[in-house]
Image (cartoon, rainbow, N blue to C red):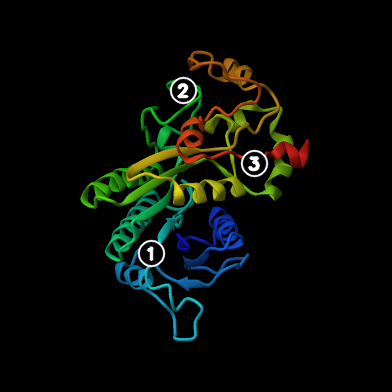
């Protein structure tokens, strides 16, 4: 499991994934439309909504003197390319871009002989944005929470998970691991966190969750190697919230009628990572508190 294609390797989470893998000895190829501001690996410019371009990229080996001349079939694909959030463009364009690119990556990877695909699903599939008029069914929210996509973006991720399940069924022996990523943060973003502390409603929309890009990359690496076949999905967040107030106190103020599933200690995340810890061996290493408080 050493040759890895990363789609969207120029984006915030994708950059962290590429760097994390390269630093650990993986050969990584970034498929993107834009160059990375942190170029740690070769990049191939590919429009992922064009099936032919993606099929060609899955079997690309470069010229005879190129360092990727042995890269004709990747060992795994990490699919992070997407329009990354709602409301960045029209609903239709967001949905069409994300669903077509996901289909193209999944299908061409399987045709090329790839057996493992790790991809970015989203916390938004669980009903975000939460607010007092649209509360979660319970907290901490886990993978059993009802799927309630509220936008073209979250619908594309919901249907991506169904696509993974069906393609895994068609291809016995293939593995699809969907990571329902929380709001991705880099260390430079943590300077904003103190400004959120007086207004709990400002971050109620995802139950005050976040994921450090470096821990996101760790989750990807764990997913590349976990012993499993078929399709599954995991919430990936950091162990703590973005707030200094206790999580149970925030829930009592903002979502007083939402039941808590078990004890919620201190600033514990309300996006449960218990399944990711148990199955993937995921263990967050970073916290915004180390950088700011």
In front: label 2 or label 3: 3
Q: Closest to the observer: 177 or 69? A: 69
C-alpha distance separating marks 3 and 1: 32 Å
According to the picture, the residue beneath numbered tag 1 turns out to be: 48
Q: Residue furthest bottom?
A: 64
Assess disc 2: are there few (<14), some (14-19) or many (≥20) residues with their C-alpha within 10 Å of its C-alpha: few
Q: Which mark identifies residue 285?
A: 3
Secondary structure at numbered mark 1 = loop
C-alpha distance separating marks 2 and 3: 34 Å
According to the picture, the residue beneath numbered tag 2 turns out to be: 133
**First in sequence: mark 1 or mark 2?**
1
Assess disc 1: are there few (<14), some (14-19) or many (≥20) residues with their C-alpha within 10 Å of its C-alpha: many
Quarter of the image for the C terminus: give it: top right
Secondary structure at numbered mark 2 = loop
Q: How many marks?
A: 3
Residue drawn 51% across and 67% down?
Answer: 27
Please give left or right for residue 127 compared with residue 202 in the image.
left
Please give left or right for residue 292 compared with residue 265 in the image.
right
Residue drawn 38% across and 36% down?
Answer: 149
Assess disc 3: are there few (<14), some (14-19) or many (≥20) residues with their C-alpha within 10 Å of its C-alpha: few
**First in sequence: mark 3 or mark 1?**
1
Q: Closest to the observer: 75 or 219? A: 75
Up the image or down, 96 lies above or below 257; here it is below
Quarter of the image for the N terminus: give it: bottom left
Q: Which mark identifies residue 66?
A: none
Secondary structure at numbered mark 3 = loop
Q: Residue furthest front?
A: 227
């Amino acid at each position: 499991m050493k040759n890895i294609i990363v789609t969207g390797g120029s984006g915030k989470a994708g950059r962290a994934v590429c760097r994390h893998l390269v630093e650990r000895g993986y050969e990584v190829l970034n498929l993107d439309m834009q160059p990375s501001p942190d170029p740690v690996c070769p990049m191939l410019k590919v429009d992922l909504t064009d099936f032919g371009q993606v099929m060609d990229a899955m079997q690309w080996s470069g010229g005879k003197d190129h360092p990727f001349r042995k890269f004709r079939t990747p060992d795994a694909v990490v699919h992070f390319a997407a329009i990354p959030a709602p409301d960045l463009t029209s609903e239709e364009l967001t949905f069409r871009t994300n669903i077509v690119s996901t289909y193209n990556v999944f299908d061409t990877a399987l045709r090329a002989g790839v057996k493992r695909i790790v991809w970015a699903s989203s916390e938004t599939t669980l009903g975000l944005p939460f607010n007092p008029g649209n509360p979660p069914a319970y907290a901490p929210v886990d993978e059993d929470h009802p799927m309630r996509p509220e936008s073209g973006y979250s619908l594309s991720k919901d249907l991506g998970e169904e696509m993974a399940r069906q393609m895994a069924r068609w291809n016995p022996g293939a593995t699809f691991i969907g990571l329902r990523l929380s709001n991705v943060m880099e260390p430079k973003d943590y300077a904003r966190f103190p400004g959120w502390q007086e207004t709990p409603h400002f971050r109620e929309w995802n139950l005050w969750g976040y994921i450090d890009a470096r821990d996101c990359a760790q989750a990807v690496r764990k997913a590349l190697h976990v012993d499993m076949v078929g399709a599954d999905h995991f919430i990936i967040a950091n162990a703590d919230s973005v707030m200094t107030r206790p999580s149970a106190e925030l829930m009592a103020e903002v979502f007083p009628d939402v039941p808590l599933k078990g004890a919620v200690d201190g600033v514990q995340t309300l996006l449960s990572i218990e399944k990711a810890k148990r199955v993937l061996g995921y263990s967050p290493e970073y916290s915004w508190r180390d950088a700011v408080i």
